[in-house]
Image (tube, grey):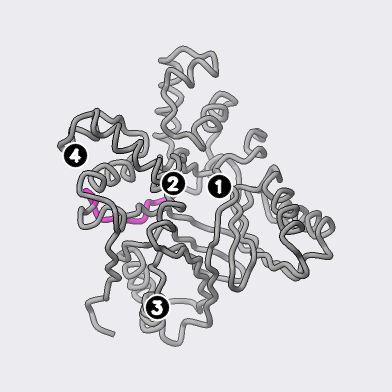
Amino acid sequence: MDKEIKKIEIPVRDLDIKDRRILRELYDNGRVSFSAIAKKAGLSTEVVNYRVNGLIKKGVLIGFNTVIDVNRIGWQIYFVYMRLRNVDSDKENEIINFLTNHSNAAQLIRCIGNYDFILKFFVRDYTEINNIMKDIEARIKPSLEKYTIDFVEEEHPIPFPFLYAPIKPDENFKFEKISKKRTSVSETDLKILRLLANNARMPLTEIAKKLELPRELLRYHLRKLEKDKIIRKYRPSAWLGTMSMGFVWFFVMLKIEKLDPAVKNTLFTYLLNIPQMTYYYNTIGTYDICFEIRLMQTSSDLTNLLREIRNILKNSLKGHELSIILREDKYTYFPDCVMNIQN
């Protein structure tokens, strides 16, 4: 394989240089103030406010989420890949409603390809996810063809550099070292996380009012959650906007043999340097590596991506599967179960 790895270059339509500067700052820190963005982007605060509202109206941005390291507070993450059978749209919507309201479900995405749904569950251990899936299977058994479960050993949210290219991030993205050590949280901490999970830009004044806390005490709790890396990232959500701009959202699953560290590093380097990469996962179970990527609606981009992966892994690649994500019905790092404190 050539030493220089090919990158997939994709132009993003309808975003001018001002939008891109703003997006870069928001993906660096989705909670940063508009005045701070204005200073770094060379714009006025009023222009930043107007532009962000415009990006929301266009659907480029649909909200701001807080990425929480739930492993640090005693939870494990599992993917469940599910295929249905003999369901019409009404039955499918009934199943989706049931699954999205499950207290342990953090994410549900609808797909076409190898699976119909990919779900992310937060549980205490494998016994709990096994029991959950037994209950779900009993509930929807006539409509369930099969499912498989993977333990998510690590997950890495990656900025969306393709949205603000050719402007580059301040630093090249690197995998954040994730502590496996559990840390304790208070009920107040959990209440703060619940409010910020799907509204990362909620002002301190509003949080303090909702929780009836003094601002300084709230600020102390929030800084501690950030310092302890329980809050990993404040991050815009942009799945709808990327679809409207012609991107297709793929979920790719790789089954590989044990890798030489140098080969593994080459694979990581390649994947992380693809601007359209948005999430990377190390998993244990059916698959070993999963990732989410946005590509334009052409077969050549996907073909080139898979070819490069095969070139890197060679005989170590045992197989791959992929699904096209049609929509995301649920996405949160704070499903209802997380309020349950267990010491």
Q: How many marks?
A: 4
| Sequence-earlier tag: 3 or 1 | 3
Within 10 Å of disc 4 (Cα), the crowding (few <14, some 14-19, many 20+) is many
Give the residue type that dot 2 points to: Ser
- Which numbered disc, 3 or 1, marks the residue closer to the eye? 1
Tell me the number on the disc at residue 331: 1
Report, in whole angstroms, how far the alpha carbon at label 3 lies from the one at label 1.
28 Å
Marks 1 and 2 close (CB-CB < 8 Å): yes
- Which numbered disc, 3 or 4, marks the residue closer to the eye? 4
The residue indicated by pointer 3 is 309
The answer to which of 194 and 109 lies nearer the viewer is 109
Give the residue type that dot 3 points to: Ile
Report, in whole angstroms, how far the alpha carbon at label 1 lies from the one at label 2.
10 Å
| Sequence-earlier tag: 1 or 4 | 4
Marks 2 and 3 close (CB-CB < 8 Å): no
The answer to which of 215 and 328 lies nearer the viewer is 328
The residue indicated by pointer 4 is 41
Label 2, secondary structure: give it: strand
| Sequence-earlier tag: 1 or 2 | 2
Q: Position of residue 284 (x, y in %)?
A: 58, 66
Most common SS among magenta residues: loop
Marks 3 and 1 close (CB-CB < 8 Å): no
Q: Position of residue 301 (x, y in %)?
A: 37, 75
Q: Which segment did they paint magenta?
A: 169-178
The residue located at (54%, 13%) in the rendering is: 212
Q: Position of residue 164 (x, y in %)?
A: 27, 52
Tell me the number on the disc at residue 296: none
Give the residue type that dot 4 points to: Ala
The residue indicated by pointer 2 is 237
Marks 3 and 4 close (CB-CB < 8 Å): no
